Image: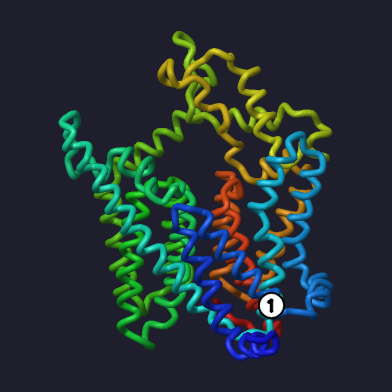
């Protein structure tokens, strides 16, 4: 096949090809091996290069006129700055590679301004993928429950399956190598997409409306089983917003159905959730080091991290320590603040808390890239929030607020699955604004 034939094929089918590639990026987020997700992004980037061809130079220049996309590129530039000052540049390069979506997606989506990509199909891909992944998690978790019981050493009841920490937050998403809070973020976004359809399109297709209600109920119960504290709090907040703020009186059946689902979730999983809340209380109240047996509460890691951040040199707030070097500073604080020979629970688990990151993406970014990276990250959030409010996109505003809270509670960008998810869906919303600035649309 000649070059001209390839070009003609791309011109005639690029809309479908871009849609399929974007769907692949979303679907592979739920796979255990992140390499497959990386391959899907590489395929997207390669097709983008083939599509753009000689116009790549003008496209790169035009990004300056799209400030929300430019903020993502600036954030990536901050990581390059962090690489230059890093003490471990080999590790910093790996982090830079993990954050490439902040560079790739703005360029790809800028091209998609003039390509008719089916955004609804991409949203449905997230919903379906989350559903399949959650079913897989429940099946593998049930297998783990059965394996424990067959060993003869344990006798876990079905009630224990729904409430015992090992079968909820600790192990439920282990089969996907996906942290529970990350999965909660994925599902919350899928729920927002479904609520937008369920509330505003009830009379269009009754079957799809009822299917959406079923999936909403299932995801709600799964979120309770997952027992992510921030995930459950935000789930209740999102449901409350849609059904009270928007005065959804005409959808009383949907309201009663979902309210009953939430109540059922509290009844079935209240023990697991209450246990998670107790962990939070203990984390906030216990001393850093227990007097007596000299053991450390590993769940208080966020408090240690805040202390380490507050005790760093003032100059480090501005210039940073280098991409990937934050952990070295944090581990040094652990060793200095606590004692080198302490244990967490058992003697063979020495330094279990060593290597635990800041559990706050804004702090993590500031420590590694200084004020440059922190400001760039905040610009992404507040610029997107302002744009969402201007265009009255409920879904985007809620997405940004939810992501912001997750970034406060965890270092989301420490994993590729966090980087890709946030960069992808935030820019997907932004694409809608740039396509037609004069038309207000909800996606």
Reply above or below: 128 against 287: below
Reply above or below: 346 against 236: above
Q: Position of residue 258 (x, y in %)?
A: 32, 65
Q: Position of residue 122 (x, y in %)?
A: 50, 74
Is 35 left or right of 8, judged from the image as shown?
left
Identify the secondary structure beneath mark 1. Answer: helix
> Which is nearer the eye, 297 or 424?
424
* Residue at the spot 45% in from the left edge and 8% down from the top edge: 292
Characterize the local packing of mark 1: few (<14), some (14-19) or many (20 or more) Cα atoms within 10 angstroms: few
Name the residue carrying label 1.
50
Reply above or below: 233 against 434: above
**Residue with the most extreme top position:** 292
* Residue at the spot 67% in from the left edge and 77% down from the top edge: 433
Q: Position of residue 38 (x, y in %)?
A: 57, 59
Quadrant for the C terminus, please.
bottom right
> Which is nearer the eye, 11 or 22?
11
* Residue at the spot 58% in from the left edge and 66% down from the top edge: 425
* Residue at the spot 32% in from the left edge and 57% down from the top edge: 136
Q: Position of residue 21 (x, y in %)?
A: 55, 73
């Amino acid at each position: 096949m000649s070059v001209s034939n390839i070009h003609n094929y791309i011109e005639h089918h690029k809309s479908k090809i871009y849609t399929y590639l974007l769907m692949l990026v979303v679907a592979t987020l739920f796979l255990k091996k992140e390499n497959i997700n990386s391959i899907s992004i590489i395929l997207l980037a390669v097709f983008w290069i083939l599509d753009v061809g000689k116009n790549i130079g003008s496209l790169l220049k035009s990004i300056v006129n799209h400030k929300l996309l430019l903020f993502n590129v600036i954030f990536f530039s901050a990581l390059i700055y962090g690489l230059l000052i890093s003490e471990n540049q080999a590790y910093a390069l790996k982090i830079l590679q993990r954050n490439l979506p902040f560079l790739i997606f703005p360029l790809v989506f800028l091209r998609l301004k003039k390509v008719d990509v089916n955004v609804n199909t991409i949203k449905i891909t997230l919903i379906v993928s989350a559903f399949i992944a959650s079913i897989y998690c429940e099946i593998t978790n049930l297998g783990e429950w059965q394996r424990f019981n067959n060993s003869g050493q344990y006798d876990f009841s079905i009630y224990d399956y729904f409430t015992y920490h090992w079968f909820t937050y600790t192990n439920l998403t282990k089969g996907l190598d996906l942290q529970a809070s990350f999965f909660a973020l994925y599902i919350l976004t899928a729920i927002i997409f479904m609520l937008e359809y369920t509330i505003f399109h009830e009379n269009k297709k009754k079957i799809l409306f009822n299917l959406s209600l079923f999936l909403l109920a299932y995801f709600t119960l799964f979120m309770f089983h997952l027992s992510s504290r921030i995930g459950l709090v935000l789930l209740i907040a999102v449901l409350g917003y849609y059904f009270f703020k928007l005065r959804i009186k005409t959808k009383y059946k949907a309201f009663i159905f979902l309210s009953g689902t939430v109540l059922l979730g509290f009844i079935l999983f209240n023990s697991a959730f209450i246990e998670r809340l107790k962990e939070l209380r203990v984390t906030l109240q216990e001393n850093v080091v227990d007097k007596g047996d000299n053991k450390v509460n590993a769940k208080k890691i966020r408090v240690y991290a805040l202390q380490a951040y507050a005790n760093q040199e003032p100059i480090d707030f501005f210039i940073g320590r280098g991409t990937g070097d934050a952990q070295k500073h944090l581990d040094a604080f652990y060793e200095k603040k606590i004692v080198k020979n302490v244990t967490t629970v058992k003697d063979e688990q020495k330094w279990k808390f060593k290597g635990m990151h800041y559990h706050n993406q804004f702090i993590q970014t500031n420590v590694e890239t200084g004020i440059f990276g922190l400001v760039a990250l905040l610009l992404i959030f507040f610029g997107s929030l302002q744009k969402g409010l201007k265009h009255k996109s409920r879904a985007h505003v809620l997405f940004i607020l939810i992501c912001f809270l997750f970034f406060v509670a965890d270092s989301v960008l420490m994993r590729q699955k966090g980087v890709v998810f946030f960069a992808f869906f935030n820019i997907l919303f932004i694409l809608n604004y740039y396509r037609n600035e004069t038309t207000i649309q909800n996606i």
